[in-house]
Image: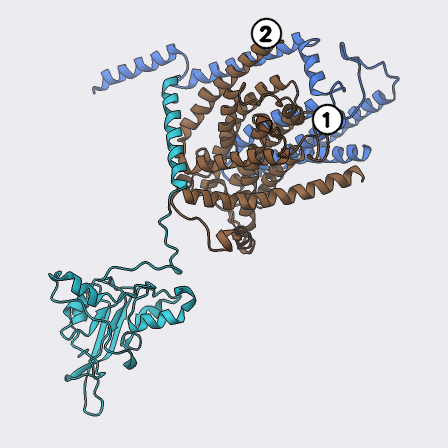
Amino acid sequence: MAMHKHLYNVGAILKGLSITLGMMFKRKPTIPYPSIRKQHAPRFHGLHELRRYDDGKERCIGCELCSIACPANAITVIGAENTPEDRHSPGERYAARYEIDELRCIFCGMCEEACPTDAIVLTPRFEMSDYRRGAFIYGKDRLLVPPEGGVGSPPDERPGGIPADLGGVAQTKSTTDVASGYDATFNGAKLKTERKGLAG
Amino acid sequence: MPIWLVVLVKSGILLFVVITTFAYAMLAERKVMGWMQLRPGPNRVGPWGLLQPAADAAKLMLKEDLMPRTADPLIYRLAPFLSLLTAFSVYAIIPFGASSAGTWAIGNVNAGVLFLLAITSLGVYGISLGGWASGSKYPLLGSVRATAQMISYELAMGLSFIGVLILAGTTSLDGIVNAQQRLWFFIPQFVAFVVYVITAVAETNRSPFDLVEAETELVAGFHTEYSGLRFGLFFIAEYVNMLTVSCIASLLFLGGWNAPFGWTWVPGIVWFLLKVGFFMFFYIWLRSTLPRFRYDRLMAFGWKVLLPIATLNLLVTAVVVAVWS
Amino acid sequence: MSVLFWGLAVVLVASAMWTIMASKPVYSVVALLANFFALAVLYLTLSAEFLAMIQLIVYSGAILVLFLFVIAMLSSGVASFSVGPNRLPRIAVPAVLLVLIALGLVVVGIFMPHPAPLPLAGAAVNAGAVGDANVFGSVADFGRALFTTYLLPFEVTALILMVAVIGVIVLAGEHAPYVGTPRRAEEVRKSLREAIAREGD
């Protein structure tokens, strides 16, 4: 019986016990999530949003470049011709259907980079859970900023790369409400009022 | 009052107390383990999570009761009750205060320690029968492990008791506590005390001796197939057993309801509960600190280290007592 | 007391019957467990406190657990004894005769004039609550009798059991290839060396 080895183990056990006891009285880093929210990164990639021009016209021209750029094949765009009576966007064409399957989406932001008119941007919204898989296919009804919502969230500065004055860009892109942690996009603000009790 | 009514009332009160203690011991374990792992622990149900046990109980009761097709229905249903029966029947003799008043224990049995050993040795049946009757491989492995482990550690546990019995000169729990009025037995019987604390963890199948449940290898060991209330019964039995071994440790080694430093102005029951609480905390502390034993090392430790040490301790105690008296 | 006795008697006989007639070996173990438990309580009513506890610790807590261990390991899940004919009916007639004879002997024994009970050496047989000190059957009395009057039989029994244990180790060691006697280990090593020499590395 190698007694000295066992005695060494006793020392190790005591050391382990002292460590766990010390941890017990430490400050816990846990954030009690729904009641207190962490502010996310300035360029956080969350749910998409389709923007408008100042005059209320849709920015999307139905070119399908986002759909081609998408590495996850999550975007479906079906374009249609604008007519003088039924005008959606300033150009010739607009997106008759614009659907994103948010379960397939990997939130890489390639669609945002590919878009020639800055129509699609990724907002910092991330609370999209639902009970049905079908609910994750977001159509224009949920992606497009409603007319009373203004132009929508500002896009990242393009093309690619981190601009020299990161601070300035971060400020324009950061749509987070510092006080509550909720994103300050139109839909985010709506969400905040709906959950007033939780937002504190 | 007739004696049977007294016993009935006492049993009812004790049952209520033990069940409540179980509920909050479970919450305390989750809280303490959370703190030790830098988490806040359950805190959503009620203030500081204090209503969590009620939520857990409701969940377990409402859950579907499943039984595998390959299970043996009779034994499968019997096993949780057997576990619970042995866990609770120990409290028939555990005194919570001096017996001179006669109110602090259901029965003061003269062969109290032997009764404890007898009942705890039956505790293995619930686990091994439950594992066998589930009719699937992980529970079977868990129950086989439980059988081997509990038999092995029972020996060292019994031997660690005997040193105390020699010093006290009696097998009644009341007498043992009274014999510790001047000196608590964990000082002269320190080796037996250490052996008992280790074997107690092994007997209750708690980490680091939880090979019976070993999540990483056996899913959940003997209760893998159990769900709902039947699982709940096993769960209750585990925590009540934990409470039992804590009570025994306090009674045999830490002087039971005797006050330290002569502070007799605090009632004995408070001291006793403090000591029990300390052991409960210690077991939770161990669980959040130590990794699980490997099975062969567990067996080697039981038979080649604990048993010889306990035997030697018994021998030395017997010789010293014989020479002195 | 007599209600308790008859209740226990029924439990004892019923569980014993179930033990031998159960269709699955594990049922037999459960029945035997009930049997041992009832027996322990019966010992308690006879003021044999120590014996009752030892009955539970040794028979239920150790021996029967080993039975269960072996059954759980060997019988795959819930296989039953259903192979082979039920032999019980064939031995029913002699068994009933035997039981009747035994019962007759018991009845004769009860109604015969008794000799005085053997007094325990050194200690008068006291009456009192079960398990009280100096009462017949208490742990102290039992121990005193075991280590004074009956010391020689006790030690001889211990020796015999020790011999049995050593015998088991020797018998098991003979067939296990790597444990056991040094001679056996040397033999194994030698045969391994020969095999390597024969086959090449």
Left or right: residue A18 compared with residue C119: left
The percent position of residue C12, horizontal first and vertical second, equals 71, 33
Read off the residue under disc 2.
Answer: B323
Residue A151: assigned label: none
The local secondary structure at tag 1 comes to helix
Q: How many numbered marks does the figure carry?
A: 2
Colour scheme in use: by chain
Q: Nearer the viewer, residue B185 or A57?
A: B185
Whether marks 2 and 1 lie on the same chain: no
Read off the residue under disc 1.
Answer: C43
Q: Nearer the viewer, residue B229 or C174?
A: B229
> Where, quadrant-wise, is the C terminus of chain B in this rendering?
top right
Question: How dense is the environment of label 1, judged by Cα within 10 Å: few (below 14), some, or many (20 and up)?
Answer: some
Left or right: residue C95 compared with residue B252: right
The shade of chain A is cyan
The chain displayed blue equals: C
The percent position of residue A82, horizontal first and vertical second, equals 18, 86
Q: Mark 2 lies on which chain?
A: B
> Where, quadrant-wise, is the N terminus of chain B in this rendering?
top right
Q: What residue type is labelled 2?
A: Val
The answer, for residue A74, to whether it is visible in the render is yes
Report how far apart the C-alphas of labels 2 and 1 lie in the structure.
Answer: 36 Å
The chain displayed brown equals: B
In front: mark 2 or mark 1?
Answer: 2
User: Residue at image x 37%, y 59%?
Assistant: A36
Q: Which amino acid does label 1 sit on?
A: Tyr
Question: How dense is the environment of label 2, judged by Cα within 10 Å: few (below 14), some, or many (20 and up)?
Answer: few
Q: Which residue lies furthest to the bottom in this view?
A: A85
Left or right: residue C101 compared with residue A122: right
